[in-house]
Image: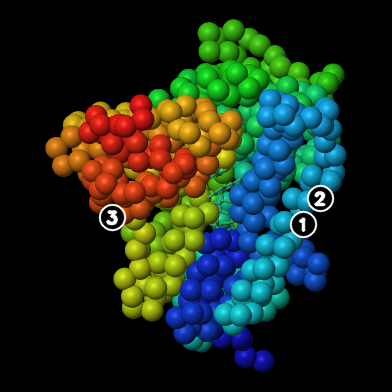
Amino acid sequence: MSNKQFDVLVIGGGPGGYVAAIRAAQLGFSVACCESNPYADPKGEPRLGGTCLNVGCIPSKALLHTSHLFEEAAHSFAGQGIKIGKPSIDVPAMVARKDQVVTQLTSGIKGLFKKNKVTQLNGHGSFVGQGGTGWQVKVGEEVVEAKQVIVATGSKPRHLPNVKVDNKVVMDNEGALAQQSVPKTLAIIGAGVIGLEMGSVWRRLGSEVTVLEMAPDFLPMADQDVAKEALKLFTKQGMNFQMGVKIGDIKAGKKGVAIAYTDKDGKAQSLDAERLIVSVGRIPNTDGLGADKVGLQLDDRGRVAVDAHNRTNLPGVWAIGDVVAGPMLAHKAMEEGVAVAETMAGQAGHVDFSTIPSVIYTNPEIAWVGKTEQQLKADGVAYKVGKIPFLANGRALGMGEPSGFVKMLADAKTDRILGVHIIGANASELISEGVLSLEFSAASEDLARICHAHPTLSEAVHEAALACDKRALHF
Ligand code: FAD
Ligand code: NAI
């Protein structure tokens, strides 16, 4: 029996892979996408959507939403005249709703595959060699041939040596999203994005949260004005941060888990907690990919090595998303997927890495695009700053969300916007205006001359643009 043949085989059905598959099919290629997710959908097939839809972006945002409502009900409703008494949380019901959202969305990708005539192949993809019409890849028990292959195998959590993750007491992102009760005490190793988002969820529901972070500075990749404000607000909310620590032995303890560590002053400390989340970054997924069989080059950090157009060292083999260099973000993976499909079709596929937004979905949310003030200083760029607090924004006050600010950085000579940094309600949505400004090389004056609806949070972005020219109207 001859092998199944396709123009394009995508290995991995996460946001990078499924988007690449859909775009390639739209452009006229015959496309298959293989997926080996051990979690099956209601039909018994591996769920599509990768980390993002199954155990990442979507479920975490569903839990962040529920826990935010819970906190609002507990602490903000009374101040607005809504009397409901003390709310209680049914954690299994919250998690079941989250699972339902995941099922709906992952099934939706199957629908999109059908609509676009992408063939889903169930099973782990592994390079076998070259022959027939192109690359041969074993998927499950069958060998598939494709003229072009896109590796989109994503990433998995990095675990600490000698710390067994059982996803019950010691958890990575999977366990953190599936707990069935609120732990009294929760320790988190790593004050990165997962630590802050998951820490927020469980703190809002009643856990006493302590975050142990190796780095001396909080959110070093963010503008430090934003980072300082965030640390102040999260601490006020009740999260406890220990920066500059060195983690020692982690063992089963009286409460659940005992973590020995050295604090920033070099003193030996220990922390007992009912549960622990380990969120110390993610590593690329190249297990069993057969990279060595075909000579697919990896870089020094185990990622698939690619050029600026996501080409690997092998002709007709591309790689995108978390398995290659760059920020591990779903929207970055999707952009690369589209760019590769379009490049394969002879179009000018392109990803502008300087305009990829970063968002942390805490309360308040944190979002930024472009350069931070510390980067501009390091690069010796002369800049001006426009900074507007949400306290001066009518909509924010009406919503009871006065925390945070918008900070805009523009070139002192040309007025071109170089960075936008927001901490505040709906920062995740507001940042799109910053992305658009950077994409279109807008000057702060351009934004300042654009009419923004009133009353909206976006007026704070408008005012920040005005403030770059020292002519803010409402602050
Ligand atoms: P993945 O989503 O990891 O998908 C890879 C897929 O390939 C998986 O389904 C895997 O099963 C499959 N696979 C692997 N190897 C093989 C093989 N050999 N054969 C067949 N299939 C294979 N990003 C954001 O932008 N916004 C967020 O809010 C956000 N929140 C997050 C929250 C959490 C808790 C986590 C963990 C991550 C979050 N991320 C977020 C990051 C985001 O999930 C990833 O950047 C994104 O999923 C990467 O997409 P990808 O397609 O490269 O890889
Ligand atoms: P991260 O890279 O964001 O943060 C990891 C943190 O752990 C860092 O601050 C690091 O200094 C610290 N750390 C590392 N080793 C340590 C150790 N031994 N002891 C103490 N601290 C240690 O990684 P995280 O939070 O695991 O998330 C992984 C990735 O998933 C993120 O980088 C991001 O790309 C993606 N993600 C994106 C989200 C979003 O866009 N909103 C949400 C969640 C995850």
> Gap in Å between the C-alphas at discs 1 and 3?
39 Å
| Marks 2 and 3 close (CB-CB < 8 Å) | no
Viewer-proximal residue, 257 or 70?
A: 70
Quadrant in which the C terminus is drawn: top left
4 shown above or below 339: below
Residue occupying the point 43% across, 28% down: 392
- Depth check: 195 or 305 in front? 195
Measure how far apart labels 2 and 3 are at the Cα level: 42 Å
Estimate the x, y position of residue 253 in percent, counting from the top left: 81, 21
Q: Secondary structure at mark 2?
A: helix
Q: Nearer the viewer, residue 357 or 390?
A: 390
What colour scheme governs how the chains and residues are painted in the rendered image of this protein?
Answer: rainbow
Label 1 amino acid? Gln
Residue at numbered disc 2: 96
Answer with the quadrant where ligand 1 appears in the image. Answer: bottom right
Which label sits in the foreground, 1 or 3?
A: 3
Q: Quadrant of residue 256?
A: top right
Q: Earlier in the sequence, mark 1 or mark 3?
A: 1
Q: From the image, which quarter does the N terminus lie in?
A: bottom right
Viewer-closest of 48 and 324: 48
Q: Is residue 464 left or right of residue 128?
A: left
Which residue is painted at 48% across and 76% down in the image?
24
Q: Quadrant of residue 80?
A: top right
